[in-house]
Image (cartoon, rainbow, N blue to C red):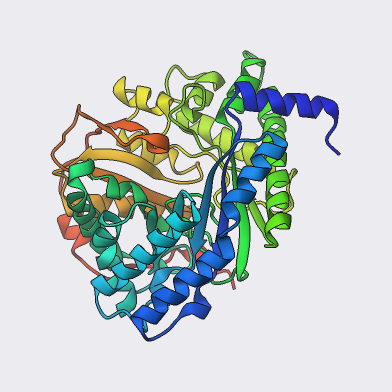
Amino acid sequence: MINQREVLETNAMIEKENLDVRTITMGISLLDCIDGDLNKLNENIYKKIYDSAKDLVSVGDYIAKEYGVPIVNKRISVTPIGLIGGAACKSPSDFATIAKTLDRVAKDIGVNIIGGYSALVSKGMTTADELLIRSIPEALSTTDCVCSSVNVGSTKTGINMDAVKLMGEIIKETAMATKDNDSIGCSKLVVLCNAPDDNPFMAGAFHGVTEADRIINVGVSGPGVVKTALEKVRGEDFETLCETIKKTAFKVTRVGQLVAKEASKRLGVPFGIVDLSLAPTPAVGDSVADILCEIGLERAGAPGTTAALALLNDQVKKGGVMASSYVGGLSGAFIPVSEDQGMIDSVKDGALTLEKLEAMTCVCSVGLDMIAIPGDTKDTTISGIIADEMAIGMVNQKTTAVRIIPVIGKGVGEQVVFGGLFGYAPIMPVNTFSCDAFINRGGRIPAPIHSFKN
């Protein structure tokens, strides 16, 4: 039972420390929608999603009002469309019609975002997978709510370098297709290694084929809560520091567990997981970078940053798993540049570089996230950045991702404003030495030796 003191603590976390439930995400299987006729397929997809999630927004609003817990987003994730559209889609434009259907049903239901315009190609690409990938620029430039993801590697299968090369090209094409809006299409596109089936956070969310027909996953967030707790133990030793983070993560996760169970009951949909990632926002006081500074760094990016982030990530997980029997998704600390005011300040001050961010992704829960780079960056350079990040995920048996935005018409020193949760970002310099010959080899990077566990 939650006692009165815990209720008061939770109220303070909500009112003063930016605690929120970042998202209730309903995962929906579309496997039973498959049809060889494109019009019928789109009709089936719309009906299945609408019938499943039509009450998601109203239930989320009710829970937020009933318990006084802000629920920032209501979202939907679906079975990777690369698996659903193969029988009916014979061209990239055919696949793009499905994106428009997803966008239409998301707007009709009232959710913020719908994810799952995705392909899983860690070992190879089917014809349908490649058509979907090639449709992404059109899909993201003609829709508002659709998010896309492509899984190009895993610890078990290695890295599909043909897909990595293609994604460098697709990211640039998406940037060009949305250049009139600061290439914002790329903010809805992520390339992954070891993508989880149950992630509620966008842009990488999709409903895995191992999941139930429908599921409720919840993502909680509380960087401001953790920072406030650490302010009370300044100068204390690491044991005290770690205990404080664990206890705080426990409290934050219990709020997510409460919301998830209530949403599950009211919607009649099984509860899946709580993702206890620390997801920052551009709001002052809601920053993972500020937590790192509270741990003892002058700026995120200073020597010691990777160690501090590793400590934070591990203690968040240790505290969270005690609060819920079903923790999943990504669960850790996000370090998106544009969505974290402290990260933005560190980049502006020269404390944080792309290379340091890459090092930090070895120990955090995601990867290179929401990073704006010059619009004239070569396709192969983007593919090289993706390959590096995929290798970190593959070797370390963890999820890594790249959500990078080449802003057409802008260069280093300029700034791009996305608005809302996407925030704004200074454009970061990129190493311009060529990796063309490496990217153009083709084929796969084999799985590491420790992948053979049978």
Asked if one can make out residue 403 in the rendered structure from this viewpoint, the answer is yes
| Location of residue 420 (image quadrant) | top left
Q: Nearer the viewer, residue 164 or 424?
A: 424
Q: Nearer the viewer, residue 273 or 42?
A: 42
Q: Which of 402 and 241 is in front in this view?
A: 402
Give how far across and how far down residue 387 sits, in percent: 31, 55
Give how far across and how far down residue 448 sits, in percent: 44, 63
Q: Residue at x 35, y 79 (%)?
A: 39
Asked if one can make out residue 319 in the rendered structure from this viewpoint, the answer is no
194 on left or right of 383: right
Give how far across and how far down residue 393 sits, in percent: 44, 53
180 on left or right of 99: left
| Location of residue 240 (image quadrant) | top right
Q: Nearer the viewer, residue 229 or 437?
A: 229
407 on left or right of 203: left
Q: Residue at x 39, y 55 (%)?
A: 147
Q: Residue at x 64, y 28 (%)?
A: 14
